[in-house]
Amino acid sequence: MTEISYLPLPFNDEGLFQVLITNQKLKNNNGKDEYGVIIRLHHAVGDGAALIEFLCETLADDSDTDSRAFCVPVFYNQKTKRTLADYLEIIIKFCKIPSCLIDGLLREPDRTSLHGPALNGKKIFKWMEYDQDLLHLVKDIKKNTKLHFSDILISSLSLGLRDYFLQEIDPAPNTVAVILPIRFPQNKNDGVRLENNFTVSILDLEVGADIETVKRHMNELRDSADPLSNHFFLKLCGILPKEILHPAFYSNQATMTLSNLPGTRALTICGGLLKSLVFFIPSKGNTGLSITVLCYGGVLSFGAMADSALISNPDELAIILNGMVKGIKQLHKEFVK
């Protein structure tokens, strides 16, 4: 994976996707050979939710969409039926858009051991799968607390970062800026569309925060004008020259990105079972750490990618991922009898 991350996409890096299959057999299971498949995509093809939709409804042998969608991403609060008060709130948010954009540009960068050094471009990967019991723990927490999946996930990340910083000589920061992709709800009648229908926002995540603090900050973020401001900026940026786009999109403020995609059942493609699935997201600017979560076939898979200027080996990434799992178990012990 590290070697492949250096390679350009086909056609002198102007191609949009590439499919690679390992030469070596990973396993022979009852006479059936198993191989690894790596799909590399340019983000222009579509966002993660659109790609999962495409995988389920177009590439899979049996397009059954009813069994998907437990591990849902962060959604922007968008009401279908609005009152006069809702329209007034929308007007107020639009008035706040200029100040949100200015605040984003003037925001101070994080200063932690995971953010600051110049990145060297060498990517380190770690991915881990956890059995169905972990998924049941998350469902139990949701049922007993009425929390969003993303709230539970971000709370567990807070605890995972705490475990990581406890290994460091430098003291742990109070907060870590986390970039969150936020999905805009799709019209169910639209069918499969390869598109980028998302925005981003930055959450100041307290390291080791309790779930109530995370829930409050997440609700404030969902209801704020910041996601809407960034959404319109992303939609309008295509008309701007690259001299403006490059500095505007250079990410130098946040330590990391956290992304989770809608879950799906186990799929067969061309008669072969896709046994496990994990994804990674591209780095931007000097934000060199990303965590991804996907529920596939009832199993939660966690992925992490970091620049080697920040983290020297995959075992360090495992501290964060295992800390997240420990955080979910801790929340279950706290809230589920």
Image: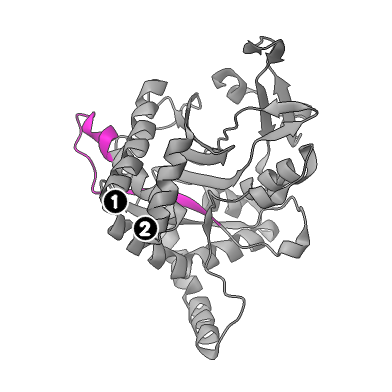
Disc 1 secondary structure class = loop
Q: Do the residues labelled 1 and 2 touch (CB within 8 Å)?
A: yes
Residue type (three-letter) at the residue carrying disc 2: Asn
Label 2, on which residue?
A: 144
Q: Is residue 212 shown to the viewer in this render?
A: yes
> Badge 2 local density, few (<14 within 10 Å), some, or many (20+)?
few
Q: Is residue 117 shown to the viewer in this render?
A: no
Q: Which of 137 and 75 is in front in this view?
A: 137
Q: Which of 236 and 169 is in front in this view?
A: 169
Q: Residue 337 carries which label?
A: 1
- Whole-Å distance between the Cαs marked 1 and 2? 9 Å
The residue at 60%/32% (across/down) is 277
The residue at 62%/12% (across/down) is 27
What colour scheme was applied to this rendering of the protein? one colour
Q: Is residue 239 left or right of residue 333?
A: right
Q: What stretch is highlighted in magenta?
A: 162-182
Disc 2 secondary structure class = helix
Q: Earlier in the sequence, mark 1 or mark 2?
A: 2
Residue 58 appears at what percent x and percent y? Answer: 79, 43
The residue at 70%/27% (across/down) is 273
In the image as oriented, which residue stretches furthest toward the bottom? 84
> Badge 1 local density, few (<14 within 10 Å), some, or many (20+)?
few
Q: Tell me: residue 334, above or below residue 11.
A: below
